[in-house]
Amino acid sequence: MVAAFVPKPYSKKLEMGSVSSQAPSNIALVKYWGKYGEQLPQNASVSFTLTECRTETTLHFEKIVPAETFNFKVFLDGKREKDFEPKIVKFFERISTYVPFLKEYTFKIETRNSFPHSSGIASSASGMAALAMCLVSLENALLGGASTALSMTSESQIQKASFLARLGSGSASRSTEGPVMVWGTHPEIEGSSNLFGVKYPYKIHENFSNYQDTILLVDKGEKQVSSTVGHDLMNENPYAEARFKTANTNLSTLINIFESGDISAFIKVVESEALQLHGMMMASEPYFILMKPNTLEIINRIWEFRSATGSQVCFTLDAGANVHALYPLLEKERVQKFITEELAVFCKNGEYIHDRCGVGASIFTS
């Protein structure tokens, strides 16, 4: 138990109502792969918070006689999704000490993604962050904050939302704020913690301002190995300790890169991190490969384009087949033309999503 996140006794009563939030996805530059304890990372990670790929969630609540079980239903795009509910039960079990009102209400969780559910983009980070924001906002009202309005009023509440989100999905801890987030204790990053994500606290050169990310949707099916299983396999991976050390070293390197604006050095770290992530998958037992032939085709085309034109576009990968093309705002027109003309053909049904760095989650009026 983390005492700092256990609330004081609630001073207000709310019989019923609703609160809505939105939270974006994020893309890690230095990857988290491998965890211990209850959703704690084996190495620190850093990510760009996105804007367009986000989840919007409305939490409807109604007071009931305290129950032995959690009472809720989940709806995605207006349709009941019972398959999602066991994951929410597990999430509620993990966080019930920190939000003790959970069994005193019945909830209707309505959620929608700005990206197609079948796109192959993981919605766990944005989804858990959005739900955590709603819960902390409700708690804020129960504590008498903001004239009992359903809102977020302090950095400590955002921090708690990140803490709760982590217990649902590790990477969700990095979706509460932006544009650059760190999750995991790192000796060179003040305020960093394994318990929650923090905004990157140091100087970021204007070269990285409004950085662009086009997500190339190579494969939209279910992954053959889930991220949860992949993380667990790191426990027996013979290269795990070296990987954790390298990740933290790469994050140290990025501190200097962010300050200097050296995009060439940025490219080397980010692409190396992406390939190491998938290298760990191939070195697991049992081993597995989440990249597809078109993943490699896109990577090679990006390398060829960069060599031929001097562009500073680069790639990173999520824990799947999709490719994130990262590039500075100044190259937006040229790179997006390249994507349309040369890379789209390698995407499932020619689909891709243009996105960019953003500021994180928020509460809004539903």
Image (cartoon, helix red, strand yellow):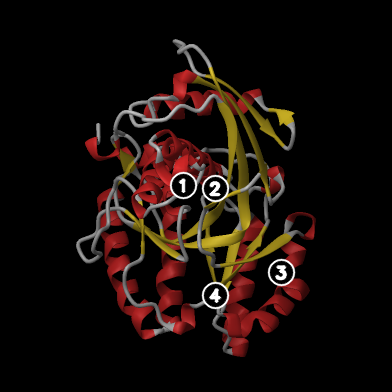
Observer-nearest residue: 184 or 347?
184
Whole-percent x, y for residue 317 in the image: 53, 59
Q: Is residue 294 above or below residue 255?
A: above
Q: Report the Cα–Cα distance between label 4 and label 1.
A: 21 Å
Q: Is residue 130 above or below residue 189?
A: above
Dot 2: within a 10 Å radius of its alpha carbon, few (fewer than 14), some, or many (20 or more) residues?
Answer: many
**First in residue order: circle 4 vs circle 2:** 2
Residue drawn at x 60%, y 71% as measured from the top left: 300
Helix, strand or loop under label 4? loop
User: Does the residue at mark 1 contact the one at mark 2 (Cβ under 8 Å)?
Assistant: yes
Whole-percent x, y for residue 19 in the image: 57, 39
Which residue type carries mark 1?
Ala
216 to the left or right of 16: right
Residue drawn at x 34%, y 48% as measured from the top left: 196
Q: Report the Cα–Cα distance between label 3 and label 2.
A: 26 Å
Tag 1 residue: 172
Res 126 label: 2
Q: Report the Cα–Cα distance between label 1 and label 2.
A: 6 Å
**First in residue order: circle 3 vs circle 1:** 1
Observer-nearest residue: 338 or 90?
90
Q: Report the Cα–Cα distance between label 3 and label 1.
A: 29 Å
**First in residue order: circle 3 vs circle 4:** 4
Res 343 label: 3
Res 210 label: 4
Whole-percent x, y for residue 167 in the image: 39, 37
